[in-house]
Amino acid sequence: ADHGPARTGRRRLGVMGGTFDPIHHGHLVAASEVAARFRLDEVVFVPTGQPWQKSHRAVSPAEDRYLMTVIATAENPQFSVSRIDIDRGGPTYTVDTLRDLRALNPDTDLFFITGADALAQLLTWRDSEELFSLAHFVGVTRPGHQLTDAGLPAGGVSLVEVPALAISSTECRARVAKGDPIWYMVPDGVVRYIDKRELYRGE
Ligand code: ATP
Ligand code: MG
């Protein structure tokens, strides 16, 4: 019987952090592509607590962002969702996310997946030196952003081209506010959840 890669080596866990306000197909394609390229056993999506870099706008309640992430990933046996950043409370620092995931997952290598825009800001993140000892970083292409590992430690980051989806949560929110459709930009269940909870209408 084939027991998969966990039999021969350490478990390989992808980590996709994000505000997910809302989660969209750009996030899902990036996670799926990196999972295949890096032979990951699983990708865990980790919605942020109150994000410090987005304090200029009201972020939707954590519970809504968490549930949308669950709805979007439920059908994929390789995808899961973690509440650790939400339950910790306060602003999310990636170093805390990775420390906690390390403690919860012994014998596991972590691969932190991040879009080109977020990767460019990596050195401004708290405890950026420690980050590279906790996880391998995988930077993915994102339309409208330059993918580069300039300034980042050699060997700590891999750059991966993923199928281009020019979708952002910001645009999804703006479209809902205008009454424009977001079908096929986010999973169907997420469209219905946004409608049911009347998210983004007043923005
Ligand atoms: P917002 O517009 O509110 O900032 P977003 O679309 O950038 O939302 P985030 O939750 O901020 O989504 O992003 C989480 C992670 O997913 C980040 O690393 C980001 O770079 C990456 N990402 C988001 N959209 C895409 C996309 N279309 N293609 C590739 N990566 C993406
Ligand atoms: Mg963003």
Image (cartoon, grey):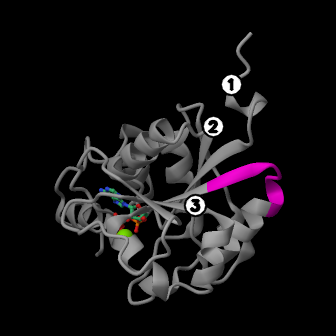
Identity of the residue drawn at 52% across and 84% down: 125
How far is disc 2 from disc 3 in space, using C-alphas? 15 Å
What residue would you read off at disc 3? Answer: 136
Q: At numbered mark 1, what does the secondary structure look like: helix, strand or loop?
A: loop
* Residue farthest to the top, as pictured: 1
Upstream in the sequence, badge 3 or badge 1?
Answer: 1
Considering only vertical position in the picture, is 113 above or below 57?
above
Q: Quadrant of the C terminus?
A: bottom left
User: In x, y percent, where is residue 10?
Assistant: 74, 42
Nearer to me, 84 or 157: 157
Local crowd at mark 3 within 10 Å, few (<14), some, or many (≥20)? some
At 30% from the left edge and 57% from the top edge, which residue is drawn? Answer: 141
Is 8 colored magenta in this rendering?
no
The residue that disc 2 covers is 41
Contact flag, marks 2 and 1 (Cβ < 8 Å): yes
Q: Residue 59 lies in what quarter of the image?
A: bottom left
Amino acid under disc 3: His
Secondary structure beneath disc 2?
A: loop
Q: Nearer the viewer, mark 2 or mark 3?
A: 3
Image-quarter location of ligand 1: bottom left
Part of the protein shown in magenta = 103-110
Q: Nearer the viewer, residue 55 or 178?
A: 55
